[in-house]
Image (cartoon, rainbow, N blue to C red):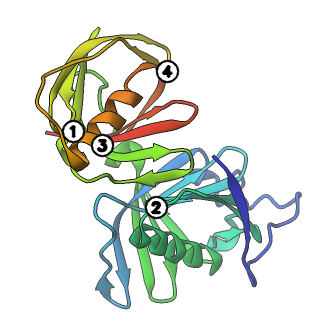
């Protein structure tokens, strides 16, 4: 995935190498190696509604970086957590995925918050980030959303990734898969599907999938073609809380767990 550097004017630069107040230091060490997911966002005293099926995600890596997501692109930079502030490096690297306008606006909103030298406070599993009239309340990811089991979960299609473009195709919410051992069943959104799948560490290998024979025209036909084309041969997989990510070198599918 291509990364571009975004330079933020007025952003506090990373503290010197001898400073012990960073993520691994005295007052930021509790953040090290942890990921937090937003549970509430308030702006000027009123709840802010995020794009449906999205949330703010902040990851503090072991090597002193902050990786942030708001629904589309991932942004990251070295971060200094000293003095109760989140000060990102002046060059913020951002992936270049193409998403809908609402998700891009949400990315820009989060980027502006991070560029403002926001304050932070950690109490048990809850992290609070504040900037002006904006307050983002987040919960440790392992508490908020433990990883679901790969097997036995109904995974509903959410996002289709082609090259550097991520999109929600029409009717995607009707497509789903469930894996149980060496079997995969599901729906393309138009036809039922079933077949065999082999697995290795971090990898699934799909055999030829059989489907029912209903004619699928328009958006339904396009979605079926995309789904079956991606569920073919070897793909890498990752379960992250309630999401399943399947990837090939040129494409991918993101699923969300549903009941």
Quarter of the image containing the C terminus?
top left
Of pointers 1 and 3, the one earlier in the residue sequence: 1
Residue at which label 1 appears: 175
- Front residue (pair 229, 159): 229
Q: Residues within 10 Å of mark 3 (few under 14, many from 20)?
A: some
Residue at which label 3 appears: 222
Question: In the visual, does 121 lie left or right of 210?
Answer: right
Q: Quick one: SS at disc 3?
A: helix
Gap between marks 1 and 3 measured at Cα: 12 Å
Front tag of 1 and 3: 3
Front tag of 4 and 1: 1
Residue at which label 2 appears: 99
Q: Confirm whether residue 147 shows in the render.
A: no
Question: In the visual, does 192 lie left or right of 74?
Answer: left
Mark 4 and mark 1 residues within 8 Å of each other at the beta carbon = no
- Front residue (pair 29, 114): 114
Residue at x 27%, y 16% (from the top left corner): 209
Gap between marks 4 and 2 measured at Cα: 26 Å
Q: Confirm whether residue 194 shows in the render.
A: yes
């Amino acid at each position: 995935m291509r990364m571009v550097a975004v330079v933020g004017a007025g952003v506090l630069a990373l503290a010197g190498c001898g400073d012990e107040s960073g993520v691994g230091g005295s007052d930021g060490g509790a953040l090290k190696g942890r990921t937090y997911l937003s549970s509430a966002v308030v702006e000027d005293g009123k709840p802010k509604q995020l794009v449906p099926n999205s949330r703010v995600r902040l990851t503090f890596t072991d090597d002193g970086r902050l990786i942030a997501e708001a629904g589309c692109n991932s942004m990251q930079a070295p971060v200094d957590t000293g003095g109760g502030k989140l000060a990102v490096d002046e060059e913020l690297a951002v992936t270049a995925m193409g998403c809908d306008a609402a998700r891009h606006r949400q990315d820009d909103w989060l980027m502006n918050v991070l560029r403002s030298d926001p304050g932070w406070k950690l109490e048990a599993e809850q992290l609070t980030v504040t900037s002006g009239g904006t307050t983002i309340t987040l919960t440790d990811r392992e508490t908020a959303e433990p990883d679901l089991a790969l097997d036995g979960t109904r995974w509903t299609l959410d996002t289709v990734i082609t090259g550097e473009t991520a999109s929600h195709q029409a009717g995607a919410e009707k497509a789903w898969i469930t894996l149980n051992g060496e079997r995969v069943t599901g729906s393309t959104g138009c036809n039922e599907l079933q077949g065999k799948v082999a697995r290795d560490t971090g990898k699934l290998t799909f055999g030829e999938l059989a489907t029912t024979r209903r004619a699928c025209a328009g958006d339904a036909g396009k979605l079926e073609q995309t789904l079956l084309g991606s569920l073919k041969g070897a793909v890498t997989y990752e379960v992250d809380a309630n999401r399943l990510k399947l990837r090939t070198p040129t494409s991918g599918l993101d699923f969300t767990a549903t009941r």
